[in-house]
Structure formats: structure tokens, C-alpha cells
């Protein structure tokens, strides 16, 4: 059995093992929060007693709860924890993400048209128009790329082509809809790497040939994304480096036709997301206005400059903390939150 994967038919939980489990928001809700804890009693194989771990204080609370073993999402045997790495843990969280290109999108109920621009103070601002025709008339032609049409609902299908080797659904299209849109929690107070609770908020649909990524299930009418998000090329490369490090996209082709793995510096350069956040670039406001382009990608890269470079650095080449720093860096927070069980003395 994989050290993380929960398999009800043969999983044997021991006292002292750590788990992540579902805690539903209400009796009738299908949404849940991912909780963490330590098994303190396994007398009943179906019902486990759990000591709750608080991600904010980085310690266990005095609370104890009882859960059905079927609610376990991720399982960390106590004896295996010392051998774990941050990469192995995040790989297990992301191993089932399926990447595809968008084939077609059907939009329903246009709600508004917006135009993103840089104002005289150098900040990003948004202007609203009643129609797309009005926006095209009033916005300079070279800035039409910053016009976005928002919809109350939309759905679409991907192409049938697999992007990475983990895609077991190759040669089949995958359905996606706005109501299932959600993104990974990589920039909140506590970083989990899993999908956030909030869903369906993305009113601007993806474009044809744009990457989407998510968790796939089989429904009555075929394959569909239960959770998905619009995906940048940088996230695809980040995922590949963590989950499929031998993939050819991480290698350079030599003259004789062989492949040599790219250097860490080369790959890290490919993960640069600073282009999505022009406000982080120290350039004159006039130049910002000329160069600014708004992107329809995952939200986190718009607010954390070089986010994926920070993540990959924390996984493969963690930097020793500066003793003079009062606050933990993003890289430190990422490792601490993802590898939470390794920070506890066992």
C-alpha cells in the first residue's frame, strides 16, 4: 500500500499515526474542510478517535473527535514519517490532477464586460461597460486583450489528448462547468495544497487551447471535472517537476537525439510567474500602462510574485532561515504547512 493512499480493504490504523480527514461543513453539505490529527484510539476499526491538530498554532488542541475511517483522505504511518520529504507529500496531494486543453466553451447569461488598466498612480483598476461593442469602441485596439466578458454560467469540453502520463482518460473528452471551478490553496494563512472550499466564483471562462487542470470523475453522461481551474504553463511545469520529474519536457534534446535533464536553474527560470503581476515590477507608471496585460490564469500567481519558484525552491533547495528575520518566509510556511506531521516530535 502507498504510504499515503487510503485503501479501506487493507488499511490498518495504529495509535500514533497521523491522518488528514474530511470534516463536512453541515449535515446536508457536500463540501468539506480538510482536518488533520493523530489517532489516539483504534479499538473500533470503523470509528477512530482523533486528537485535532491546529494549523494556526502548529500544535495539537485539547479537542478530541470521533470519525468514520471512510473519511480518511491521507494516511501517514508513524514509522514512515521520518523518511518523508516535502516533495513526496505534495506529490501525493497532486498525483490525480489531470491536465487538458480546452476544445470548446459554451457561455450562458452574459453579466458584464470589464476592462483592466493601469491608472495614473500605477495601480490596476477595472472599468465596466454595458456591452462588448461599447468596450471595443472606447478601449484602444492594442488594449483589447485586457477586455473580459463575464458570464453567470458556462460549460465546455476539453480535447481528448492527454498532456501528462498520469492521464488514464486519454482519447476521451472531459466536461467542465463554472459551478465546479476552484483553485488550490497555496496562498492563504494556512497552505494546504488541496482545493479551497470556495467554488464557482470564476466568471470569465477559459479560452480555446488554454490549459485546465483538476480532479476527474465518471458521471452518467461521461467524464467530468469534479473540481478544476484554469491552469498556467508555469503550474504545469511545477506539477511535472514534482510528480513526473523524468518527463521529456524537463529535458533538452542533444544533437545525437538523446535527452539530458535541464539544470535546476533552467527549470526554475521556466517557473517565473512575475509577468502576471506587473505591479511587482519597479518600472515607471508610463511604461506600466504601455506594457500591462491582464491574464486569465489561476488567482494565486496574480498576487504572489514568482510563487512557483518559491515553492520549488522550498522543496528542492531550502534556504537556511535568516536569524534576523521576525517573520517566516513563504518557503518556510509552505514546508511547515505541507509537511506538518514532520514538525511534531514523535
Image: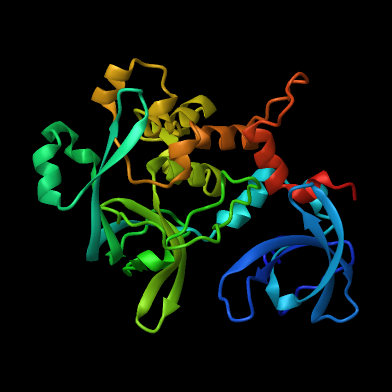
Q: Residue 51 placed where, x, y %?
A: 85, 63
Residue at horizontal 41%, vertical 58%? 201
Give the quarter of the image for residue 320: top right
For the residue pair 267 and 107, the one nearer the viewer reads as: 107
Residue 329, compared with residue 195, is above or below; it is above
Q: Residue 267 placed where, x, y %?
A: 47, 31
Residue at horizontal 47%, vertical 62%? 199
Q: Residue 226 placed where, x, y %?
A: 46, 69
Q: Is residue 158 visible?
A: no
Residue at horizontal 37%, vertical 30%? 275
Residue at horizontal 46%, vertical 58%? 182
Task: Locate the N terminus and report the quarter of the image it occupies.
Answer: bottom right
For the residue pair 154 and 314, the one nearer the viewer reads as: 154
Q: Residue 293 placed where, x, y %?
A: 28, 33
Left or right: 304 as drawn, with respect to 188: left
Left or right: 162 as drawn, with respect to 24: left
Amino acid at each position: 500500500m502507498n504510504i499515503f493512499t487510503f485503501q479501506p480493504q487493507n488499511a490498518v490504523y495504529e495509535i500514533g499515526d497521523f491522518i488528514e480527514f474530511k470534516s463536512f461543513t453541515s449535515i446536508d453539505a457536500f463540501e468539506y474542510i480538510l482536518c488533520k490529527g493523530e489517532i489516539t484510539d483504534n479499538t473500533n476499526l470503523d470509528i477512530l478517535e482523533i486528537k485535532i491538530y491546529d494549523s494556526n498554532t502548529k500544535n495539537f488542541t485539547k479537542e478530541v473527535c470521533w470519525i468514520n475511517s471512510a473519511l480518511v483522505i491521507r494516511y501517514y504511518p508513524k514509522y514512515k514519517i521520518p523518511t518523508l520529504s516535502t516533495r513526496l507529500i505534495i506529490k501525493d496531494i497532486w498525483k490525480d490532477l489531470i491536465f487538458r486543453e480546452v476544445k470548446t466553451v459554451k457561455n450562458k447569461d452574459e453579466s458584464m464586460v470589464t476592462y483592466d488598466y493601469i491608472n495614473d498612480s500605477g495601480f490596476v483598476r477595472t472599468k465596466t461597460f454595458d456591452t462588448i461593442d461599447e468596450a471595443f469602441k472606447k478601449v484602444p485596439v492594442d488594449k483589447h486583450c485586457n477586455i473580459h466578458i463575464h458570464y453567470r454560467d458556462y460549460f465546455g469540453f476539453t480535447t481528448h489528448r492527454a498532456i501528462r502520463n498520469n492521464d488514464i482518460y486519454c482519447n476521451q473528452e472531459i466536461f467542465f462547468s463554472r459551478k465546479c471551478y476552484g483553485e488550490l490553496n497555496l496562498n492563504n494563512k494556512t497552505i494546504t495544497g488541496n482545493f479551497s472550499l470556495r467554488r464557482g466564483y470564476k466568471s470569465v471562462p477559459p479560452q480555446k487551447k488554454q490549459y485546465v487542470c483538476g480532479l476527474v470523475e465518471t458521471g452518467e453522461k461521461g467524464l467530468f471535472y469534479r473540481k478544476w481551474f484554469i491552469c498556467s504553463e508555469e503550474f504545469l511545469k511545477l506539477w511535472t517537476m514534482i510528480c513526473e520529474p523524468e518527463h521529456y519536457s524537463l529535458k533538452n534534446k542533444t544533437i545525437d537525439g538523446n535527452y539530458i535533464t535541464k539544470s535546476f536553474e533552467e527549470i526554475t527560470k521556466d517557473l517565473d510567474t512575475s509577468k502576471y503581476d506587473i505591479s511587482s515590477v519597479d518600472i515607471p507608471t508610463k511604461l506600466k500602462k504601455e506594457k500591462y496585460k491582464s491574464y486569465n490564469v489561476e488567482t494565486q500567481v496574480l498576487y504572489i510574485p514568482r510563487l512557483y519558484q518559491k515553492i520549488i525552491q522550498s522543496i528542492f533547495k531550502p534556504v537556511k532561515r535568516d536569524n534576523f528575520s521576525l517573520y517566516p518566509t513563504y518557503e518556510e510556511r509552505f514546508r511547515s504547512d505541507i509537511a506538518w506531521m514532520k514538525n511534531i516530535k514523535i
